Amino acid sequence: MLRRVIRSILLEKCWDTHKQVGFKMKGKGRNKRRVPNCVPKNETDLNEADVDEAKKKKLDKDKMKCNKPRRAAAGSPKKKTVKACQDGKEKIIHYGHRGMQHFSQHKDPKRRKSFRARHKCDQKSTKNNKLSARHWACKDLW
């Protein structure tokens, strides 16, 4: 009985216009069974095209200027992006919470003092390390 069920699952095929992408569960309760997940061939091609398009939209490290912050791309959870360059090393850094106001917007000295103390902005290690998000948040936003 079990062999017959396994064989029927493995031998089920998709239509000519569809492609199998793994398995899915079908049915309820005792009738629940595993069946092939058949999706249209064109749909899988569209997903691959979306991936290629996303790769093209990624930040091109060569085109960015060193140590020049700019607004992050739409949809990014971060507020700013910078290509940090120091001692021959290059690194793309995303920093800042998109929903938060920075000092130039709210101009509240208590908030500024609290942020700078919490993130240790006045320490030498923070000031000198351009390859960290902390450095850029302290320098650019606060």
Image (spheres, grey):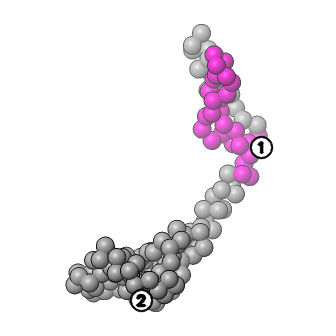
Q: Does the magenta stretch include residue 45?
A: no
Q: Are marks 1 and 2 in contact (CB under 8 Å)?
A: no
Could you tell me if residue 129 is visible in this image?
no
- Asked if residue 16 is positioned above or below residue 2 in the image, the reply reads below
The percent position of residue 95, horizontal first and vertical second, equals 44, 75
Q: Residue drawn at (63%, 68%), measured in percent from left and top? A: 53
For label 2, the residue is 66
Q: Is 109 positioned to the left or the right of 127 in the image?
A: right
Q: Is residue 40 magenta?
A: yes
Identify which residue, 10 or 107, lies in the foreground: 107
The percent position of residue 138, horizontal first and vertical second, equals 36, 82
- Asked if residue 77 is positioned above or below residue 83 in the image, the reply reads above
- Asked if residue 120 is positioned above or below residue 65 in the image, the reply reads above
Label number found at residue 80: none
Name the amino acid type tagged 1.
Answer: Thr
Name the amino acid type tagged 2.
Answer: Cys
Q: How far apart, in angstroms, are the residues tagged by discs 1 and 2?
A: 50 Å
For label 1, the residue is 17
Bin the neighbour count of mark 2 within 10 Å (Cα to Cα): few under 14, some 14-19, many 20 and up: some
Q: Residue drawn at (70%, 57%), measured in percent from left and top? A: 46
Q: Residue drawn at (63%, 23%), measured in percent from left and top? A: 33
Identify which residue, 100 or 98, lies in the foreground: 100
Outermost top residue: 1
Quadrant location of the N terminus in the rendered image: top right
Q: Residue drawn at (61%, 34%), measured in percent from left and top? A: 23
Q: In the structure shown, which secondary structural element does the residue marked by tag 2 occupy?
A: loop
Q: Give the magenta range.
A: 16-43
Identify which residue, 6 or 86, lies in the foreground: 86
Camera-side mark, 1 or 2:
2
